Amino acid sequence: MAITKNPLIRYKILDQCFRNPGKRFFIEDLIAECNSILYELDQHHAGISRRQILMDISFMESSEGWSIELIRSRFGRKVYYRYADLNYSINGMPLNAVEIDQLKSALQILDQFNGMPQFAWMNELLAKLQQGIRTNTSEPIMAFDSNQYLKGIENLGLLFNAITYKIPLKIKYKDFKSEAAYDLIFHPYYLKQYNNRWFLFGFNPERNNYHWNLGIDRILFINETTIPFVDSVTDWSEYFEDIIGVTKPNDSQIENVRLIFKNETTKYIINKPLHGSQRTKFLDEKELQVDLELIVNYELQSLILSFGDNVKVVYPEHLSSFIKNKLISALNLYK
């Protein structure tokens, strides 16, 4: 299924055609109208077939759709389509199964944001949607901590659909280490947000790596491909359990990490644990011992450095030395 072939878009286009009293819309006209608007939305749109339009009409007439009353009138040897009541529109009807499913998907996306609570009101809202009950709009009272100016954020929906419909992609990518952009074939599996940035995980056939990580802000161009999709072999709900962030070094091992936090930072660490494995013990009123079992990666190092002089790494030695050298280098900048 192509990313841009959104059935709701086609239903809205057909709805406008069926209630237009000034033009006769034959099947060819309906196809042309849909293709024209879909091409404006996506220049890579391949076109809608006659069979697809007929299936869309059949769905709109069904009880699962909107039960529309459609008149098929002959003009010469051809048939044109028009609503029995030209004042009718699917826009004024209760939500159908397709719209409810799309709203469910949107709510599931919100529910899966890392760090967000499980909203009890979602189940109540879905029940209302399924009954076609309209709710009054109100001013927003809640906001996500997100970066709306992040480069590449406009591709987030496209990548989500590519994962949903298992569409391999050809991506032009420019990482921070390479001087020039390069192309790669990518089978997308999972999207993860960390530190207000989005990362795409999937299979890179060239490297034979099923956990390849792409920052979406470094994706320059995306194209669909027609090659067979390679399914994921990873349980993504467990993949990130042993790390902070998104980086899992090759041949990495879980290590015991001990940190000593000082002063007011201790309260912050108690209220917002660094990792699910965190165990804490107060050494005195101003010192908190924190033990972690996880893989040492770039994000952990950066997180420790962000606490400045309010944390000390007790072990492992390689992490302690790394943090110490970084702090010395930072101090040298001010000499």
Image: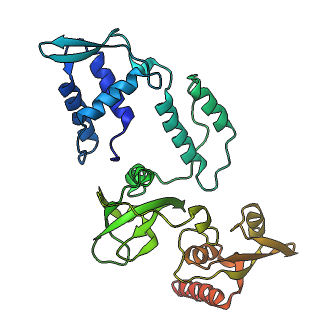
- Can residue 196 be seen by looking at this rendering? no
Closer-to-camera residue (204/308)? 204
Residue displayed at 39% across by 20% down = 61
- Can residue 223 be seen by looking at this rendering? yes
Q: Above or below — where is 89 with respect to 198?
A: above
Q: Image check: 105 left or right of 273?
A: left
Residue displayed at 56% across by 63% down = 236
Q: Above or below — where is 100 with respect to 79?
A: below
Q: Quadrant of residue 295?
A: bottom right
Q: Position of residue 18 (x, y in %)?
A: 29, 18
Q: Position of residue 78 (x, y in %)?
A: 15, 18
Q: Position of residue 292 (x, y in %)?
A: 72, 76
Closer-to-camera residue (13/65)? 65
Closer-to-camera residue (101/307)? 101
Q: Quadrant of residue 137?
A: top right
Q: Image check: 38 left or right of 278?
A: left
Residue displayed at 18% across by 27% down = 28
Q: Position of residue 325 (x, y in %)?
A: 58, 89
| Number of numbered callouts drawn | 0
User: In the current view of this chain or complex, which residue is farthest to the left?
Assistant: 76
Colouring: rainbow
Residue displayed at 44% across by 74% down = 209
Q: Image check: 58 left or right of 77?
A: right
User: In the current view of this chain or complex, which residue is farthest to the right?
Assistant: 284
